[in-house]
Image: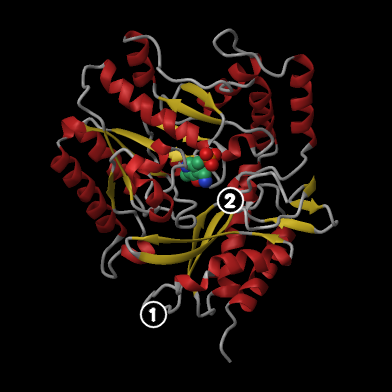
Amino acid sequence: MTHVFHRNPKQTLPYAVKGDGIHIIDSTGKSYIDASGGAAVSCLGHSHPVVIDAIKHQLDQIAYAHTSFFSSQAAESLADFLSSRAPGDLDHVYFLSGGSEAVEASLKLARQYFVEIGQAERHIFIARRQSYHGNTLGALAIGGNEWRRKPFLPLLAPAQHVSPCYPYRDQGSHESDEQYADRLAQELDDTIERLGPQNVAAFVGETVVGATAGALAPVGDYWKKIRQVCDKHGVLLILDEVMSGMGRTGYLYACEEDGVVPDIMAIAKGLGAGYQPIGAMLASDRIYQAILNGSGFFQHGHTYMGHATACAGALAVQQVIEHEQLLENVRQRGEQLRRELHQALDEHPNVGDIRGRGLFVGIELVQDKASKQALDPGLKTHARIKQEAFSQGLMLYPMGGTIDGVHGDHILLAPPFICTEADIHEIVKRLTHTLERVLPRQA
Ligand code: PMP
């Protein structure tokens, strides 16, 4: 009997005892390729000596001092690093301990901004149906994963949901990317008009959708068009880059590729790369000034925010990525990964779509390619794939979920930025083998 209340109490898990680059070794000596970076976290792989030294160095000085008394050089340097590389005027960095906290803070900051500028009616958040923004109550309220939300519905603040940008399923066969993006932007415009623009605080979306739909990147100018609609109505744009940010797509901030600047952005996972629990919210100067010139205080805060050891670890992670020019590797290896997946799996009858950006790659599985009919949810294909891959020493992040009443099985790949050409070959080889076992092709 274990006293740890595990994520899935029915499972018996091996113990991870050692990390070695892209590998995790368990207590029996078995080695696993971390092809999902856990959940798109471990972007530098495991046991990186530079990061470990930076953390040790900080611990030797001071581990933690409460942020109502002190700042730290680590927090100041990390904030400088992040803001100086962020697009637009996202100049102000508020540290948190993870992704859900970063999203909660973003929602509260948006709300308080409108209170400060005398538009206190603005309280409605609009998000998208296929999204995941975290498991705390505020983040869950805006999230669009029906299964995660269902038991807690009476506790969730009402939020509005619009259509996801999901070209594989929703783009018309004769609809150009431009027309599809226009249609989605119009839907947001209509929704804001219906709710009354004076009541709407912000639109929230993952720049590239991760956990709910498997590395789902938007078409062409989707975000630019959404930004225009937000601006037209004085609605803030909050981008959740908890999973897609910090280099995962080949750009430090995923939205750089889309040419948009949000008012508020949430980051986490790759920020500390798993070496320390850390997240952050970046806020534009306009929002920061409104707080400063208003009540002068953001009514928020957590005990561990701005934790010096977490900041020191994250700063080292980001410096290594920059010094070693790993984002170039992310772009190259990402292209290689998609190319090899296409070569290996395009003919597989259950592989409906292969998509993504950088080393953020998704595979959507279907029962029938022509109709795109989903696999029977009762088969729990995603869970079987995870188990089979794990037995073969491959960590994948498969998911099954329901969007607009349609079930879907996806596999998310998010290997560390340090992976080599040979590592990608091996990942594709083991993944192909896994799929052939779980979903064998009919002779
Ligand atoms: N937002 C997104 C886009 C995420 O992918 C996640 C985590 N999967 C979260 C928020 C929540 O982050 P955390 O689990 O660190 O609270």
The x and y percentages for residue 214 are 49, 57
Dividing the picture into quadrants, the one containing residue 147 is bottom left
Q: Tell me whether circle 2 and circle 1 mark residues in contact (CB < 8 Å).
A: no
- Residue type, numbered disc 2: Arg
Seen from the viewer's position, the closer of residues 304 and 286 is 304
Left or right, residue 242 beside residue 156 = right
Residue 370's label in the rendered image is: 1
**Quadrant of the rendering where the C terminus is positioned:** bottom right
Seen from the viewer's position, the closer of residues 341 and 395 is 395
The x and y percentages for residue 248 are 56, 45
- Residue type, numbered disc 1: Ala
| Residue 398 visible in the shown view | yes
The x and y percentages for residue 165 are 34, 54
Judge depth for marks 2 and 1 and give the one in front. 1
Q: Please tell me which residue is depicted at 31% across the width and 58% down the height of the picture.
A: 177
Dividing the picture into quadrants, the one containing residue 436 is bottom right
Image height check: is 369 above or below 363? below
Q: Residue furthest front?
A: 1
Q: Residue furthest bottom?
A: 443
Residue that badge 2 annotates? 331
Structural distance between the alpha carbons of marks 2 and 1:
31 Å
| Residue 243 visible in the shown view | no
The x and y percentages for residue 312 are 68, 24
Q: Please tell me which residue is depicted at 37% across the width and 35% down the height of the picture.
A: 238
